[in-house]
Structure formats: structure tokens, C-alpha cells
Amino acid sequence: MLVLTRKKGERVLIGDDIVVTLIDIRGDGVRIGFDAPRGVPIQRAEVVVAVTEANTEAAATSASTAETLVGLLRGVRQPAAETAEPAATDVPAEPAAPEASAAPAAPPAPATIPARRPPGPKPGPRPNL
């Protein structure tokens, strides 16, 4: 790890196309600006860790959960015998058609938070330092 001392307004270049600028110093925190190509993801480490942990937890299944899912899928493939009333545990073979007045479903949340740039014009050519 390279450790540098920088003053407010000073920059650090990473490669040819990434610029890190020390914007402000406030008490025990600093504000840092990153200028990088759109294809370079810039994310806070704590957010990446939290999303990874949430995805791992959501993907973990217990044996009982897996058995329940298998049972439900078998119920869909093999329709129950004809009875006067369907049992409470029967699963319909086809999902009910959505009502015309139903609002469209929201898109799923992204697994990661994309990097955002502040609004404004694109940065011009970089000075040769």
C-alpha cells in the first residue's frame, strides 16, 4: 500500500485515466473526489461487503426449505385428484392472470450499487503533471 500526505486540492494519478483529488478536510474525515472512466466501478468497501453478505444469506437454504420447494414443484406438475373443494395446500397449475388495474411490478434491486458521477459537463483533457 502506498501512503501519501496530501493537502486540500492536491491530486493523485492512478494510471493514465484515474485522478483522485482531496476535496476537503473536516475534523476526523476527508472528502475525496474520484475521476475515472465510466467502465471503472468505484464503490465503498462497506457497501460491497454488506451486499455480498446479504446475497450469501439469501442464497443459503436449509434442507427443509429445499424439501418444501421440491414438494411445491411436484404439486404443480402433478395436479391433485378431482375433489369438490381444493385442499388448502394445493398449488394451482397456472398462475392467476393479473388484473388490468394492477400496477406493474417494480424491477428487482441491483446486487451492487453503480458508481455515480456528479451532474455537470464531462471533464476535459487532463493536464500533464
Image (cartoon, grey):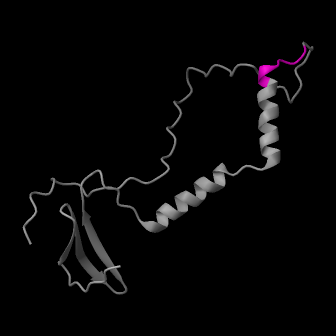
Q: Quadrant of the N terminus?
A: bottom left
Residue with the most extreme right position: 84
Q: Quadrant of residue 22?
A: bottom left
Quadrant of the rendering where the C terminus is positioned: bottom left
Occupied quadrant, residue 127: bottom left
Residue located 83% across and 17% down the image: 79
- Horizontal and vertical percent for residue 20? 24, 70
Task: Magenta stretch: give its range.
Answer: 76-81
Q: Where is residue 120? Give x, y as percent.
A: 18, 54
Residue at 57% from the left image edge and 27% from the top image edge: 102
Residue toward you, 72 or 103: 72
Of the pair 101 and 124, the residue shown nearer to us: 124
Question: Predominant secondary structure in magenta?
Answer: loop
- Residue 58 magenta-highlighted: no
Residue drawn 59% across the image and 60% down it: 53
Question: Is residue 55 visible to us here?
Answer: yes
Report if residue 77 lies within the magenta region.
yes
Q: Please state the horizontal and vertical placement of residue 27, each as a whole percent of the image.
A: 34, 87
